[in-house]
Amino acid sequence: MTQTKPQTIRVLGIDPGTATVGWAVIEENNGILLPVAFGHISTEKHNTEEHRLAEISKDLISIIEKFQPQEAAVEQLFFFKNQKTIISVGQSRGGILLTLEQKGVRIANYTPLQVKQSVTGYGKAEKKQVQLMVKNILKLQAVPKPDDTADAIALAICHINSRKISSLI
């Protein structure tokens, strides 16, 4: 009887933004989720858009090179309440997708509804519910801050859950 090698996957979750980009590297090994690292990239408001986008890309490259994720889960812009920031967040997301593609990281996109459904079981869950589930799933001491970081973790968890489901089909 041959045994299959356990598959370990590292997923980079990214919550796009201009002022703050949440990121998280989560590893799955034989069904066990482990937080490798998480945090956020902050840019200064007084800098030009192009400088802020370059800074996000540079920091993202450092994260990819340090943690070597094979796949990335990026939040899709599905609906946005603030019309003034949608364009800048869209530009940030475009820069993030370009950076991931250039670094050879496979990309999956998820709507907030898909992430909430995957992490809490309810697509219209409140942000606080998602944050508490992230904390519980990864057995963290506290809810990660800022919110963008917790959202990035939820994106990575969503992607890992989606990979499991698609492997059953």
Image (cartoon, grey):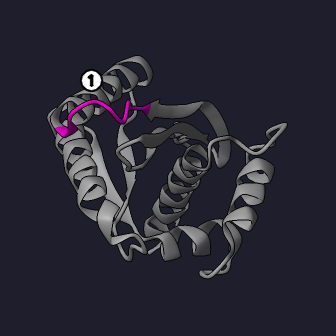
- The x and y percentages for residue 121 are 68, 76
Q: Is residue 128 above or below residue 58?
A: below
149, 109: nearer the viewer:
149
Image quadrant in which the N terminus is located: top right
46, 121: nearer the viewer:
46
Give the residue displayed 33% in from the left and 60% down from the top.
85
Tell me: 77 left or right of 164.
Answer: left
Residue denoted by label 1: 58
- The x and y percentages for residue 151 are 56, 53
Tell me: 40 left or right of 32.
Answer: left
Asked whether residue 45 is drawn in magenta, I would say: yes
- The x and y percentages for residue 17 are 38, 49
Give the residue displayed 62% in from the left and 82% down from the top.
124
Residue, far right: 141
Q: Is residue 103 above or below residue 32?
A: above
Image quadrant in which the C terminus is located: bottom left
Magenta-colored span: 42-49
Characterize the magenta stretch by its predominant secondary structure: loop
Q: Secondary structure at mark 1?
A: helix
Q: Is residue 148 above or below residue 168?
A: above
Q: In this rendering, does residue 11 appear at all?
A: no
Asked whether residue 95 is drawn in magenta, I would say: no
Q: In this rendering, does residue 167 appear at all?
A: yes
Give the residue displayed 53% in from the left and 67% down from the top.
115
Tell me: 126 left or right of 11.
Answer: right
Give the residue displayed 34% in from the left and 24% down from the top.
59
